[in-house]
Image: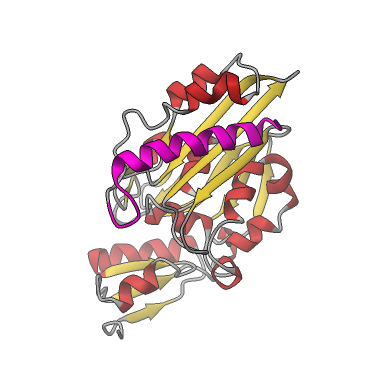
């Protein structure tokens, strides 16, 4: 289908972009990489009066080191993340998850922050950022505020970003030296995740000292498996020691039931994938 007619603006600064959003209100939509928005426009699920393209704002581009954290600007593409030595060294889990996203064409256009604010529960970015305890930097007419990932995802396709605001960056604490793995279950290559498990593990002498586990497409938002994380601490990094713990990862979740599988099936598979992801992250 062909999108409905709209006006187009390409501001050169965040302030100019915010001014356009304030001027046009609900009639405006923000475009960054466009990998989420353009299909919506083509299917006419949304018909904005104006598109505000922030991809030319230089201050939003780049991946930088900020003390004990890495800052990823809203203009940084998936490919920028894959090519970043900082991300590969300090945010291995995110680096591995991005490798599983779609194909090279999409990875050269789509952005990390665009995916986060789109908040598709089947997207591959939310769970790793949640598990790594990222902080979302949001700018609006009243200034800048920071929202932890644990409070950012509100509901299906809904985040803490309010009307007239922009997600300008995500800041993620370094996890240098942690093992990591992203286990993605799909039926067709490049598909949205039926289930995804993001696991980061800090092991000491074959024992799990810390563990972080994020779940993709196991509810209306990315989820953090806090109970499983706590239970893994102190366990030997072996299948025998962690198998029963990981099998419980689906408890309390509300995954969808669709053509790819019923909710109970997804809960069972999530347990299997969590065991694989944790063992791989621990180097077992």
Residue 18, placed above or below residue 44: above
The foreground one among 82 and 236 is 236
Residue 154 rendering spot, x and y as whole percentages = 31, 42
Q: Residue at x 48, y 46 (%)?
A: 196
Residue in the foreground of this view, choosing between 212 and 256: 256
Count of numbered badges drawn on the protein: 0
Residue sitting at x 39%, y 36%: 268
In the displayed structure, does residue 240 sit left or right of residue 264?
Answer: right
Q: Is residue 272 magenta?
A: yes
> Looking at the rendering, which quadrant does residue 216 occupy?
top left
Image quarter for residue 80? Answer: bottom right
**The C terminus, quarter of image:** top right
Identity of the residue drawn at 31% across and 75% down: 41
Residue 10: x %, y % from top left: 46, 75
Residue at horizontal 36%, vertical 73%?
A: 39
Q: Is residue 260 left or right of residue 193?
A: left
Q: Is residue 147 visible?
A: no
Residue 8 belongs to magenta span:
no
The way the protein has been coloured in the rendering is secondary structure
- Looking at the rendered image, the quarter that the N terminus falls into is bottom left
Where residue 265 sits: x, y (%)? 35, 42
Dominant secondary structure, magenta: helix
The span picked out in magenta is 258-284
Which one is nearer the viewer's eye here, 9 or 135? 135
Q: Is residue 17 visible?
A: yes
Q: Position of residue 214 (x, y in %)?
A: 48, 37
**Residue reaching furthest top?**
234
């Amino acid at each position: 289908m062909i999108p409905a007619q709209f006006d187009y603006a390409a501001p050169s600064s965040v302030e100019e972009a915010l001014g356009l959003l304030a001027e046009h209100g609900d009639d405006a939509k923000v475009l960054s990489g466009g990998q989420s928005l353009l299909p919506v426009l083509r299917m006419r699920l949304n018909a904005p009066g104006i598109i505000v393209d922030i991809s030319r704002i230089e201050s939003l581009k780049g991946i930088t080191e900020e003390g004990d954290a890495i800052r990823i600007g809203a203009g940084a593409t998936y490919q920028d993340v894959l090519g970043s030595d900082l991300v590969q060294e300090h945010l291995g889990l995110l680096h591995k998850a991005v490798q599983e996203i779609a194909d090279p064409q999409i990875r050269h256009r789509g952005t990390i922050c665009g995916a986060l604010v789109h908040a598709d529960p089947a997207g591959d970015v939310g769970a790793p950022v949640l598990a790594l305890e990222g902080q979302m930097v949001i700018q609006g007419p009243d200034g800048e505020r920071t929202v932890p990932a644990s409070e950012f995802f509100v509901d299906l396709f809904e985040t803490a970003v309010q009307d007239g605001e922009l997600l300008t960056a995500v800041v993620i604490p370094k996890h240098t030296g942690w093992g990591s793995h992203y286990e993605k279950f799909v039926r067709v290559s490049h598909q949205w995740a039926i289930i995804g498990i993001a696991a980061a593990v800090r092991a000491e002498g074959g024992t799990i000292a810390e563990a972080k586990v994020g779940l993709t497409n196991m509810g209306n938002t990315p989820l953090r498996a806090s109970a499983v994380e706590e239970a893994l601490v102190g366990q030997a990094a072996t299948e025998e020691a962690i198998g029963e713990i990981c099998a419980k990862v689906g408890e309390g979740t509300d995954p969808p039931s669709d053509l790819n599988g019923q909710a109970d099936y997804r809960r069972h598979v999530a347990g299997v994938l969590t065991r694989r992801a944790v063992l791989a992250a621990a180097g077992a």
